[in-house]
Image (cartoon, grey):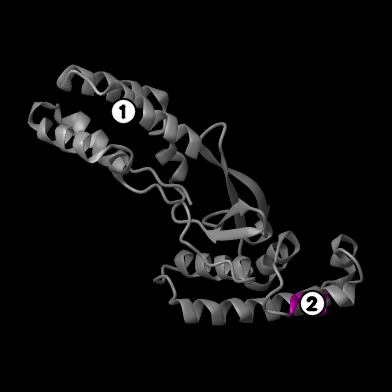
Amino acid sequence: MFHLCVVILLSRANTDALMGHQSQLEVPFLELLAVLVLPMDLGLGIPGDGRCMFRSVVHGACLRAGKPSPAESLEKELADELRAKVADEFLKRRADSEWFLEGDFDTYVIGMRQPHVWGGEPELLMSSHVLQLPITVYMWDTRSSSLKIIAEYGQEYGKENPIRVLYHGYGHYDALRSPLGVQQSKLLDTFFFTQIQEKIMETMGGPKMIVMHIAFQFGAIF
């Protein structure tokens, strides 16, 4: 997950100084600063317990249906149910799926029924068939500071409002918090940092190094 909190990056002394000058700052700047202090989490924090992909899909399906986020215990139960149905779907679609699974087909399916075995692209495809819903997988692009679509499954069931899954890399999946991540990323532009730096220096006579430190840390995160 990705976080940015200006208050954390500022020292306590400089934070107090900045807040002490807030009456002199323009309202648009304060609003911008308030936005930047908000956490920029893209995922919902799905645990990496071997069933993260299945958890992410069922969590996303609940959100898509307008239901509240499931409790951890219910999410786990739904994830294990989906895993079992996905394994059955492999058997049903053996002629179409055997060629893209690694190793022996039967061994693979038996292994996938185990709760600690990670799911990946084949399981996302089968999940779309089980649920008869489209699934879109996103990943954070550090170069453009935005979300990008890396895979789409089940588009034969429709293309509108897919289940949205976030891939963090290294085999971990998460449920995507919001499809508006790309719009949020527009705040992560050098232009805004330039505005912040100029406004703080103009108002406070300037902790230039502090603002540069924020930009450096921010760039390191993304």
Q: Secondary structure at mark 2?
A: helix
User: Are there few (<14), some (14-19), or many (20+) residues within 10 Å of tag 1?
Assistant: some
Residue 209 vs residue 201, the one in the foreground: 209
Magenta-drawn stretch contains 112: yes
- Residue at left 51%, top 56%? 161
Looking at the picture, how far across and down is residue 119, in whole percent? 70, 66
Q: Is residue 173 above or below residue 126?
A: above
Looking at the picture, how far across and down is residue 147, in whole percent? 53, 42
Magenta-drawn stretch contains 76: no
- Residue at left 43%, top 35%? 218
**Is there a contact, CB below 8 Å, between mark 2 and mark 1?**
no
Looking at the picture, how far across and down is residue 204, in whole percent? 16, 22
User: What's the magenta region?
Assistant: 109-113
- Residue at left 86%, top 72%? 94
Is residue 170 shown left or right of residue 220?
A: right
Residue that badge 1 annotates: 210
Residue 3 vs residue 31, the one in the foreground: 3
Picture quadrant of residue 211: top left
Residue that badge 2 annotates: 111
Q: Is residue 213 above or below residue 133?
A: above
Q: In the rendering, which numbered label is found on residue 185?
A: none
User: Which mark sits nearer the N-terminus, 2 or 1?
Assistant: 2
Amino acid type, residue under disc 1 in the picture: Ile
Q: Is residue 34 above or below residue 124?
A: above
Q: Main secondary structure of the magenta part?
A: helix
Residue 174 vs residue 137, the one in the foreground: 174
